[in-house]
Amino acid sequence: VPAHPARLRLDWGCVPLERGTHPMPPCHLEFASPLGFWEVRRQAELKGEVRVYPNLQSDRKQVAAMFLRRGGVGMQVRRQVGKGREFEKLRDYLPGDSAEDIHWKATAKRGRPVTKVFRIERTQEVYVLLDASRLSARIVGRSWRSEQAVEDMDGGDVPGRGATVLERHLTAALMLGMAAEQQGDHFGLVTFSDQVRNFLRARRGRAHHGACREAIYALQPRLVAPDFDEVCSYLRTRLRRRALLVILTALDDPVLAESFVRNVSLLSRQHLVLTGMIRPPGVGPIFAGAEPESVEDIYGRLSGHLRWHDLQELQRVLKHRGVTFSLLEHERMTAELVSQYLEVKQRQLL
C-alpha cells in the first residue's frame, strides 16, 4: 500500500456459484504500529452487497440463429400469415371483397355496400408465469461453470451444483422477454407459489427489462404447493386485454394437474395459454432410446412410460380447453419456447 494514498482501489475477482443477493463479509485490516513493535489488526463492516443475476450465455448460444440479422443482433421479423384481425377502417365495396367482410349496418345506413378493412396487430402483450413452488426446486442438470473459475482454483474443480427447474425457467423467461422486445411486443412477468409474489404489467424498453431482472434475480423456490386457483383468479381480474400467457410449471403430480385443469379455464376463455414443463428424467415411450441393460432398467422404462402416458392424457384434456401443453427438453428449453412464440406471431393466433 503506498504511503498516504488519497484513494485506494482494490479489485477482487470472483465467480458466482449461486444466484441471489449476498451481503459483503467484514473487511480485516492489518497494519504496523507507529514504532513498528507490533501489528495492529482491525475488523471493519462493509455496507454493501453482491447481486448475482441469471446467466444467459448458454441460452443466447441456443437461439443465436434466431437473433442473427445481416451481421447484427436482432430478431428477424417473420412474414405473418393472414390479412390481420384488428379493425382499421371502413371503405366502399370493391370487386373481389369477401362477403364476410361486409359491414351490414353501415351498408344499410349508406345505401351501398361497405367493407371492413383489417390490419395486422403489431403490439401485443406476452406474459410469462413462473411457478416458484416446491416442484421447481428439483435438480435438472449441472450448473454452468467457467474455465476461468477452474484456473482460479489451482486446477481444481468448481463445486458442482445442479441447476434447478426454477433456474431454467428464469433464464427462459428473460430470453423470451428479449425476443418479445425485438418483435415489438410488450412483455410482462408473474411469479407465484401459494400466492402471487410478483406481478409486472407488460411493457417494453430497457428499463422494463431491468425491472424484470430485479424482480426475479433473488427468487427462490418455496416448499409449498402452487395455488392455481389464486393465480388464475388474480390474472382474470387484472388482464383486460387478450394476451399470450406462457405458464412454466410442473404438472407430473396428479393432484396439481387436476387443480390446474380445473382453474386454467378462467384464463383460456379470454387469453391464449401455452403451458411448458421440463421433461422429467426417464419419462418417455417405453421403446424410445437405447436398449435396457438390466432388470432395473426395464422397470424404470415401464415407470417412465406410465408417467409419459399420463402427461399425454393431460395434454389432450388441456387441448379441449384451448390450452397448449408441451414437454420441453431442459437443454433446449429456451429455443423451443422462442419457436412457439414466433409461431404464434406468424399465425396471428392472438
Image (cartoon, rainbow, N blue to C red):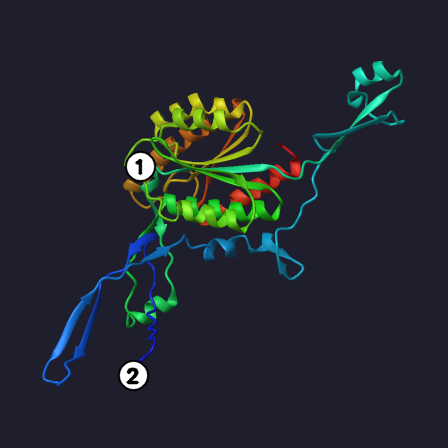
**Rendered-image quadrant of the C terminus:** top right
Secondary element at tag 2: loop
Numbered label attached to residue 176: none
Q: Is residue 335 visible?
A: no
Distance from disc 2 to disc 1, alpha carbons, whole Å, reads 53 Å
Nearer-N-terminus badge (2/1): 2
Under mark 2, the amino acid is Pro
Q: Position of residue 76 (x, y in %)?
A: 65, 50
For numbered disc 1, what is the local secondary structure?
Answer: helix
Which sits in the foreground, 48 or 118? 48
Q: Residue 70 at what x, y percent from top left?
A: 67, 59
Q: Amino acid at mark 1?
A: Arg
Q: Residues within 10 Å of mark 1 (few under 14, many from 20)?
A: some
Residue 293 visible in the current orientation: yes
Q: Which mark is residue 134?
A: 1
- What is the count of numbered marks? 2
Q: Is residue 291 above or below residue 129?
A: below
Give the vertical position of 291 relative to 57 (above or below).
above
Foreground mark, 2 or 1?
Answer: 2
Mark drawn on residue 2: 2
